[in-house]
Structure formats: structure tokens, C-alpha cells
Amino acid sequence: MAKKFLAFIPMLLGQIYTEPLEATVGAPVMISCLLPNLTNLNWFYWEESNITVYHYDVNQKETTHSSYERRIEVFKNEFSFGNISLRLLNVGVGDDQKNFTAAVKFYQHERLLLSNEWCKRRLQVSAPYSDPELTLNKTQMLATCTIRGGYPQSRMSWKGVNKSSAAEQDLNADDMSQKQDPTTKTYTMSSSVTVGGLQSVTCFVYDPHSKKEKNTTLDITEENHDLTALWRILVPVAVVAIVVAVVTVLAIFCCRQRIAQSRGSGGCYMEMELRARTPLKGKSK
């Protein structure tokens, strides 16, 4: 029988990744780890920040740290095939930048292999922001761009098209704010810019989840034309309504005055009828 010997595997021979493992808030992430040419698995454990997340020993009962109960899955039926991957469930913002390391002891044919860092992955957590919403305060001529539910913080920028020259120009934000949800730890961010003298304004948002830039544009000229058109309709209607109201009030006032001065009965309508029938003096001969 061949003599067994102990070999400490250098980190470079293990599955050590320098690039982070992308994970999304609220979704699971698979932290893969495979043992090549496995013939017998003695034990392994996953560790994170000096916490033993999960421990397996062929001669002992498996254990899971209390902070990761109902948050991890392993694949026991595949241990014998060298698959000791760990699935982390319901990823949260708090998992961002965590390092998960697998230590192992296993046999590769007659060779005993031992490593404290066979697999190592660093999580990079993100959450997609909503599409940017662009609103205009016509009184202050202030445009505000808002994004919601994302992580980490995003970059927001502005460009505008000058109304007189039609030239595009970079704009400096007048105000920026951010609010972190106390439960999900995701962000709502907003940025505002003055749009006086512009015919359009565009808000640009870099989404760290998709690593792409989103944008939305507001046509200031069109907004102003809509407002002008509305006033062109409302002003004539208002003038006609005022004239009708004034004429009505004057007619009522006149009628009441004539009723008060009339000596007979019948009101102002009878008096007007009587006068219409009476010939004017000097014209009848």
C-alpha cells in the first residue's frame, strides 16, 4: 500500500478569486467550491469574519452558525463528488464585501490534502435603482430627478440645451439628497437643477447594479407652450363669464329700482310696456 503523506496546498492552487462575486439584494447567490479528483472527504467548513458559517465532519454532526440559520444551503448528496458549494439566501446590503472562505481536508486518491483557504470569494452586493423620474417646478423653474430602491449610492449628473443657442451644456446640481431605508438599507436619491433659459434638460444616472447609465429628458419649451395654451383658453372664458355676470347684476339692480319707483302694480315690465305704447309729445298732430 502506498504511503500517505500530508500536503499543505498553497493558496494559488486553491480556488481563490480576486474579482468579487456579484450578488443582488433579495436574491440568492451561489458560492461555488469544488474539490478535484476527490476520493474521500474528511471535513470542511465555511468561514466568514472568524465566524464558522457551516461545518461538516464525516465523524460528527454538521453545524450551522445561528446568524446563518435558514440563510444557507449545502448539497450533501454532492459532497462525495467534491461539490462543497454554499448557497447564501436572501442577500442583503449587510452582506456586501463579506469574504467567505472554505477550509478542507480530503483525500485525492492516496494523497491527503489540507488547506485553510481552498475556496475564497468576496461578495459585492448591489440593488437596481428604479428608472429616473424627472419633474419640473414651474414656479421656481427647478427640475428634480429621483431614483429609488438601489444600492450602493449612485452618481447623478445633468446636461441642458440652451434655449437661445441650442448648445448642450453641463449643469451643476443646486441640491442633492439621499435617504437610506432603515429596513432594506437601500437608497432613495434626488438631485435638482435650475432650468431657466433652457429648452430641455436631461438627468443621467449611473446604475452600479447593471453598470450602465440611465437617463431621462424633460422638454422645458413644451411645458411652457402647454401652459401658454392653457392661459389662452382660460382668459377669454373668464372675460366672457365676468361680462355676463356684470350684465346680469346690473339688470337685476335696474329692475328692482324701477319696481321701487313704480306707483302702480305690475313692476318694471308693465311700466316699460306702458311707455312703449304712449306716443311721444310733439310728434302727433
Image (cartoon, grey):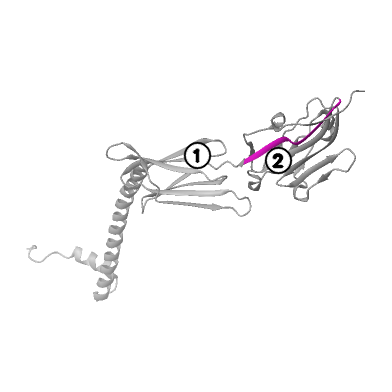
Sequence order check, earlier mark of 2 and 1? 2
Residue 6 image position (x, y, % from top left): 82, 31
Q: Quadrant of residue 262?
A: bottom left
Quarter that holds the C terminus:
bottom left
| Amino acid under disc 2 | Phe
155 on left or right of 238: right
Q: Secondary structure at mark 1?
A: strand
Residue 137 image position (x, y, % from top left): 40, 51
Front one among 140 and 48? 48
Residue behind mark 2: 100
Front one among 92 and 110? 110
| Amino acid under disc 1 | Tyr
Q: Quadrant of residue 85?
A: top right
179 on left or right of 111: left
Residue behind mark 1: 206
Front one among 225 and 189? 189
Marks 2 and 1: which is nearer the front? Answer: 2
- Magenta stretch, main secondary structure, is strand
Range covered by the magenta-colored residues: 110-124
Q: Badge 1 local density, few (<14 within 10 Å), some, or many (20+)?
A: some
Measuring 32% from the left and 56% from the top, which residue is drawn there?
241
**Residue 39 on the magenta segment:** no
Residue 57 image position (x, y, % from top left): 86, 39
